[in-house]
Image (cartoon, rainbow, N blue to C red):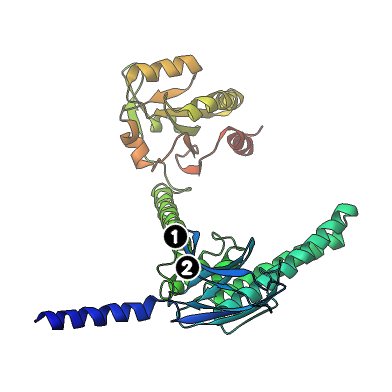
Amino acid sequence: MNPMTRHLILFLVLGALAACTGAGGGRTVDITVEGAGGRTVHFNRFQANRPMTVDSVELDGDGHGVLHIPPMPLDFYQLTLGDDKVIIALDSNESVTLDASLGMLSMPKKVSGSPNSEALHAFYRDSREFDEQREQLRAAMSNEPDTATIRKLNELNAAFYQRCKGFAAEHASSPAALAALGKLDMQRELGLFKQVRDSLRRTMLRSSFYTMMRDQVDRLEQQEVVLKMQEEEMKRLSNIVPAGGPAPEIRQNTPDGGTFALSQLRGKVVLIDFWASWCRPCRIENPNVKKVYAKYKSKGFEILGVSLDRDQAAWVKAIKDDGLPWKHVSDLGFWQNAAAQEYGVQSIPYTVLVDREGNIIEKGLRAHDLDAKLAEILGS
């Protein structure tokens, strides 16, 4: 390639870039601000959520001016006149006409030419009307609260919430949807948030406003997945030893080196109490369990403590320090305790109540609920 050809190609490339990015191309913002003749309006894009000026125009004597905006992706942009500001939403093909009054730029009298900006400001107007009605009702309640006013306020809140949902769904591919989502509970409306996230991924992927919303939705979605997996695992573990079924045999070592089995307590109502010396909630619960034991022991109630300890001395000391008078066993296997594994124990304290025939009555009873259940079975 000869030098002249290279220079020609370079010239054409630079020319193309200038045509794509220079002022005067792309779209326009036709703005009229009543009472603002001679003032300067700035058009800002957001970088790292901070406004950066792209173009500005000095308004003529009638408060009119035209800003020439280079093509930029669909996003939120800002117009400022001193401290007065307004947000608009534009894509690379949209131009917008905006009429406002000085000091009221955030509430323009007219927005046209840009479907995204028109939708955004229609939502803003609806939000302002809602805020005004809500404040009126709140003022009435502070003066003389009554059930009728409370009902009206609740109905107003519920109706606006539904309008926000409908607006976000209808404008899912527009930045305007983000304004409506800001009024909603993400956890409660996760499906709608995901719909908007997926729609905007195709239209405003590089927007910092979008990526912030996307990351929040992604995190909550992942949390929901993990929670569902945990619930399924808990359900699976619960079905390992279901209520009404036989309680699996437990045969482990006693503190004095002997062995003891759950089946040796057949004929009594037995609470299998999974605990450990290192488990603070277990130790806090022990005095409450002792009271229940003292109340029902003479009526055929017994407890088998199954420790998830791994240190013999710590286990024995905890039994002595807490004064636990019932039967105790452990294989010192920590969380791998064979009985805990077979019963699907995921956290302690954890209890399983077994009837006289060795069948499971109920699981997860704490002292207060245990007392009520034993009163039902054995009599108070």
Q: What element carries label 2?
A: helix
Residue 250 seen in render = yes
Please determine whether, in this image, residue 185 is positioned above or below residue 116: above
Residue 48 locus on image (x, y percent)? 45, 58
Residue 277 locus on image (x, y percent)? 42, 23
Residue 292 locus on image (x, y percent)? 59, 27
Q: Is mark 1 on a helix, strand or loop?
A: helix
User: Is the residue marked by circle 2 packed among few (<14), some (14-19), or many (20+) residues within 10 Å?
Assistant: some
The residue under the point 63% across, 74% down is 121
Q: Is residue 52 left or right of residue 309?
A: right
Query: What's the amino acid at mark 1?
Result: Glu
The residues bearing labels 2 and 1 have C-alpha atoms spaced at a distance of 8 Å
Tag 2 residue: 194
Residue positioned most to the left: 1
Query: What's the amino acid at mark 2?
Result: Lys
The residue under the point 54% across, 29% down is 301
Q: In this view, does 313 lie to the left or right of 354?
A: left
Please determine whether, in this image, residue 26 is positioned above or below residue 144: below
Marks 2/1 in contact by CB < 8 Å: the verdict is yes
Q: In which quarter of the image is the C terminus?
A: top right
**Nearer-the-camera pick, 8 or 165:** 8
For marks 2 and 1, the one nearer the N-term is 2
Q: Say which quarter of the image contains residue 229.
A: bottom left
Tag 1 residue: 221
Q: Say which quarter of the image contains residue 59.
A: bottom right
Q: Quadrant of the N terminus?
A: bottom left
**Nearer-the-camera pick, 166 or 151:** 166
Residue 63 locus on image (x, y percent)? 67, 76
User: Is the residue marked by circle 1 packed among few (<14), some (14-19), or many (20+) residues within 10 Å?
Assistant: some
Q: Say which quarter of the image contains residue 260.
A: top left
